[in-house]
Amino acid sequence: RKRVALAAALAQRADVLLLDEPTNHLDWEAIDWLADHLQQRGQAGKQLSILLVTHDRYFLERTCNEVLELDSAAVYRYKTNGSYETFLRRREERVSNENAELNRQAERLKREKAWDDKSPRAQQAKSKSRSAAYQDLKEANMQIEGDRAMSRATAR
């Protein structure tokens, strides 16, 4: 049944294919044929877009030159030119940059909290905007950390 549905989708010559684990019920020969067919369709002058969900890294590398990642309610796009290793490297760079930014925000939060804690209450009227900025930063940081925790919990 899966093979028939896949064949019907390919026979329609659509511009966009949505494939969910297309290699799960195929033998090696069929997987090779499908990868070759999708490559030829993509090179035939007419753009073919494939939204592919797969755990088959070999198939992914043969058929895709971009990877879209859904993480923490955001979509990230990576140009890979068929290399899953490129995706992993670029993803790690993105996560490292985000972690560095979170660390900078955490340091700033510490400084602002120390300032807020030692400011005399009588002088706070002058610095309400700074206190409000501190609260905004604190809330934004909590939101980012909450999104990341949710993403980690759902990834398991």
Image (cartoon, rainbow, N blue to C red):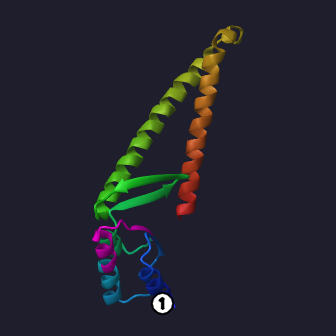
- Residue drawn at x 49%, y 57% is 70
User: Considering depth in this image, is 68 or 114 the residue closer to the camera?
Assistant: 68
Query: Amino acid under label 1?
Result: Val
Is residue 92 located in the magenta-colored stretch of the structure? Answer: no
> Residue 39: percent from the left, percent from the top?
30, 73
Q: Which residues are magenta?
A: 37-52
Depth order, front residue of 53/117? 53
In the image, residue 111 lies at what x, y percent?
52, 23
Which residue is at the front of the view, 82 or 99?
82
Residue at point 59%, 24% (across, down):
113
> Which residue bears the numbered disc 1?
4
Q: As displayed, is residue 38 above or below residue 153? A: below
**Residue at horizontal 58%, vertical 30%?**
137
**Which percent across, then down, holds residue 83?**
28, 63
Residue shown at 31% from the left, 89% from the top: 29
Q: Secondary structure at mark 1?
A: helix
Image position of 29 (left or right of 20): left
Q: Quadrant of residue 151?
A: bottom right
Is 96 located above or below residue 14 in the figure?
above
Percent coordinates x, y for residue 141 in the rendering: 56, 37
Q: Is residue 137 above or below residue 10?
A: above
Question: What crowding class fits label 1: few (fewer than 14 Cα within 10 Å), some (14-19), or many (20 or more)?
Answer: few
Q: Is residue 43 magenta?
A: yes
Quadrant in the rendering for residue 60: bottom left
Number of dots carrying numbers: 1
